[in-house]
Amino acid sequence: MSVATYSARVDARVKLDISRWLLRAYWLVARGIFPVGPAVALAEGPPPPEGPPASEPTAPASPPAPPPSAPGPPSPPAPSPAAAQSSPWAAAPPPVPPPSSPAPPPTGAQPSPTAPPSAPPTKRRGWTGGRVTSLVIGCVLGLIALGVLAAAGAATWATSSQRDSAGFLNSDTHRFTTPTYAITSGGIDLGTGTHWLTPADIFGKVRIRATATNPTAGVFIGVGPQAAVDNYLAGVGHEVVTNWANGDTETRLEPGSGRGPQSAPAGAAIWTAQASGQGTQTLSWRPESGQWEVVVMNQDGAGGVSVLADAGATIPDLAWLAVILWVIGGLLLAGAIALVVVPVVRASR
C-alpha cells in the first residue's frame, strides 16, 4: 500500500525584543532603581505569547511596558530598533550617579570654604622705648616753650601798656627814708671794654626821678663812677638799697663815723649826670660800660633823707624782642605738641 507524503514548513523566530527587555530589567535591578519584586518578575521573563499556529505568520508582539519606577533621575533613552536588532548585546547606557546631598552650612567654629580668610588680629605694640623718650622730650620742650611765651607776653604787655608819653618803661614808685646822709644804689656793673652790644643798646636812656616828702626841702640826684662815689661817702653813714627796680627792695646800713660829707653834693666834681632842686627832680643818663653808682641826698647834704623815687628806661629793642620771643615760643610749642601727641595716638591703637 502506498503512503501519502505531505510537505511541511517550520517557522522559528527569536524574540529579540524579549531578550533586550530582560537585559534592561536586570540592569535596573542591579542599580537599585526598581524594587526586587518587579525585578524578579521581569527576570523570570514574560510568558510566551499565545498566537496562531506556526503555519500562520503573525506580526511580532509589542514589548511589555516597563513597570512604573520610583521617583529618581530619568532613565536613559531606549536605543533605536535598528541598533537593537543589529546587536542584541548592545552596551547598556552609562550609570547615572545618585544625587549628592547638599553640604551642611558652616558652623561658627568651621569657616566657610568660600569666604575669604580673615586677617590675623594685629597686636598692639603699646609704649615702646622710643615713644616714652619722645613723650618726655615733648613735655620738657613744652615747659620751655611756655616760659618763652610768658616772656613774650610780658614784653608785649610792657611795651604796649607801660610806656609813658616820653617812651620810658617805669618801675613802681617807692618811698625811701633813712636817718643817715644818703641813699645809694650800690655798685652797678655794666661791663667793661667795647663790645658789639653796649648797655646803651639794651637800656636806651635811663631816667631817675625823686621828690622830697618835705615840700620845702630840696633833693639831689647824681650818678658817677663807683670808685669816686665811694671816696666821696667814705666815713659818711648811708643806706644801700638793692633790687628796688623789681619792687622787692632790700636795704643795708653803712653806719660810717657819724660825720656828714665834706661838701654839698652838687659841688663835688664826680658826677657824670646830676639834678637838684625843690619838687620833683629828673636825671636822664645814657649808660656806658663800667662800674656806676646812683646817689640821692638832701640838696644841702644834711642827714635825714626821705623821698619818693622811681626809675625807667626806654629799652628801644623791646618790641622786636617780643616778636622774636613769640616766634621762638610758637615753634617750640608746636614741636612739643607733635612729640607728645604722635606717640600717644600710636600707643593707643
Image: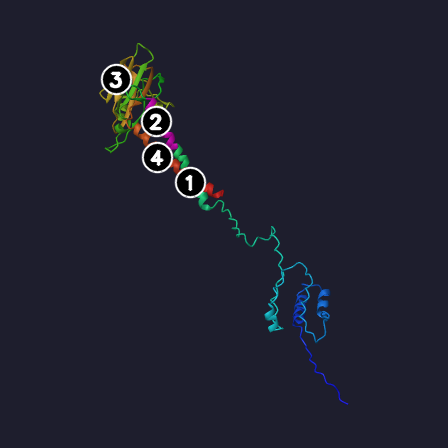
Mark earlier in primary sequence (1, 2): 2
User: Badge 2 is on which residue?
Assistant: 156
Q: Dot 4 surroundings within 10 Å: few (below 14), some, or many (20 or more)?
A: some
Q: Position of residue 117 (x, y in %)?
A: 53, 52
Q: Is residue 217 above or below residue 155?
A: above
User: Badge 1 is on which residue?
Assistant: 339
Q: Tag 4: residue type?
A: Ile
Mark earlier in primary sequence (2, 4): 2
Mark earlier in primary sequence (4, 1): 4
Q: Position of residue 233 (x, y in %)?
A: 29, 21
- The residue at the far top in this view is 216
Report the disc number at residue 167: none
User: Badge 3 is on which residue?
Assistant: 275
Q: Position of residue 35 (x, y in %)?
A: 71, 63
Q: Mark 4 and mark 3: span between their CA atoms?
A: 42 Å
User: Badge 4 is on which residue?
Assistant: 328
Q: Quadrant of residue 139?
A: top left
Q: Quadrant of residue 177?
A: top left
Residue 339 visible, this angle: yes
Q: For numbered disc 1, what is the local secondary structure? A: helix
Task: Kindly check if marks 2 and 3 are in contact, taking CB atoms under 8 A apart as contact.
Answer: no
The reply to whether the magenta stretch includes residue 307 is: no
Q: Tag 2: residue type?
A: Thr
Q: Tag 3: residue type?
A: Ala
